[in-house]
Amino acid sequence: MTSQSVEKRVQTVCLLILSTVAIAFSLYWLRNVLIPVVLAFFLTILLNPVVSVLMKRCRMSRGVAVVGSVALGFAAMLLLSFIVSIAVSQFTANVGLYQERIEKLSSDVMSALPLHRFGIDEKKLLNPLAAGPQGGVSELLANVLRSVFSIVSQAVLVLIFLFFLLIGKHPTQPSRSTIWEEIDVRVKRYLIAKTLLSIFAGILVWSILAVLGVPLALTFGLLVFLLNFVPNIGSIIATLLPIPIVLVNPDISLPVAILAIALPAAAQFILGSFIEPRVLGNSLDLHPATILLALIFWGTMWGIVGMLLAAPITAIMRILLEKLEITAPIARVMAGRLHEAPSVMKT
């Protein structure tokens, strides 16, 4: 390899690094605009089959089918908002009881620990938990309300973008790009399968918690549905979420509390370890380490929405990188095919 080719390769790598930094900064700075657009893009992929079915089976025009699909999305948004509002109302009604229970459990735990041997004042540790009506659990509730308002306001923008993306898509027109065909097939297969599995997991966990009499069972089922879109760690977080409510509720006995934790955990384990791999397979063609890094990156950029979309966005990036000779080794590393990357680098 000549010195000129080495210099050119170094320049190319430096330009790629600078471009990556600039793109990352742009993604973070423009997140309020990009998040609704990207969500609408993936919803378009998910709802295009619905539009096609309405056009073929119900003999609707494309405009009417698109309006029906967007109305379906709007109804889903209203349903989610209604569920969250019910959960917030239930939480508000019992906030005093939960605060008192948290303080008692914390006091019991602190008393059992030999903190005095290390010169730690137990009262100082309990003071933040013993906050008044403007702090503690109430502050958490206020944060939830702000988050809900932000999500609902973004959902309106998503529906607007979704309508224009759907109305501009013509399924009868042949695709001009094999890259788009691969992206469409892989992402559509992943989104449809993941959505159905997440719905099943949410309904299952909701049913278990409702039968056991756990408060906010419907909310926890909704959170299971959403968090199951976060690969690897989402189902773990969803399983742990009911634990604080189970612990602070005095009406729940110890056997019921154990079942409320163990049964959803077992259901999530079976779905994640046996059913989901058979249904999804390797549809995204991404290594688990790549998915974990993608979760960290997109979570930093776009928060919880970024974590929900990390896997399909990274899969699209891998497909695009694989089509360029200079970035093809990166795509193979993302897929975990490390033995193929060196041979490509030498060419």
Image (spheres, rainbow, N blue to C red):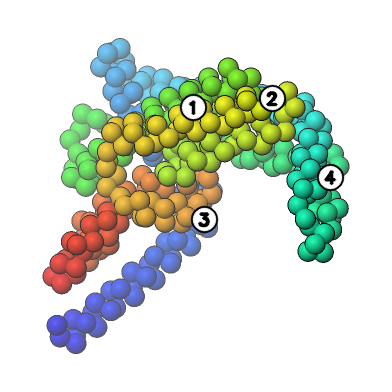
Foreground label between 2 and 3: 2
Residue type marked 2:
Ile
Mark 2–mark 3 distance (CA, rounded to whole Å)? 37 Å
Contact, CB < 8 Å: mark 3 with mark 1?
A: no
Q: Position of residue 24 (x, y in %)?
A: 45, 61
Mark 2–mark 1 distance (CA, rounded to whole Å)? 22 Å
- Per the image, label 4 sits on a secondary structure element best described as loop
Q: Position of residue 187 (x, y in %)?
A: 31, 39
- Which residue appears at 30% of the width and 12% of the height? 58
- Per the image, label 1 sits on a secondary structure element best described as helix
Mark with earlier residue (3, 1): 1
Determine which residue is flagged by label 3: 300
Q: Position of residue 156 (x, y in %)?
A: 54, 33
Residue type marked 1:
Gly
Determine which residue is flagged by label 2: 252
Q: Classify mark 2: residues with Cα within 10 Å, few (<14), some (14-19) or many (20+).
A: some
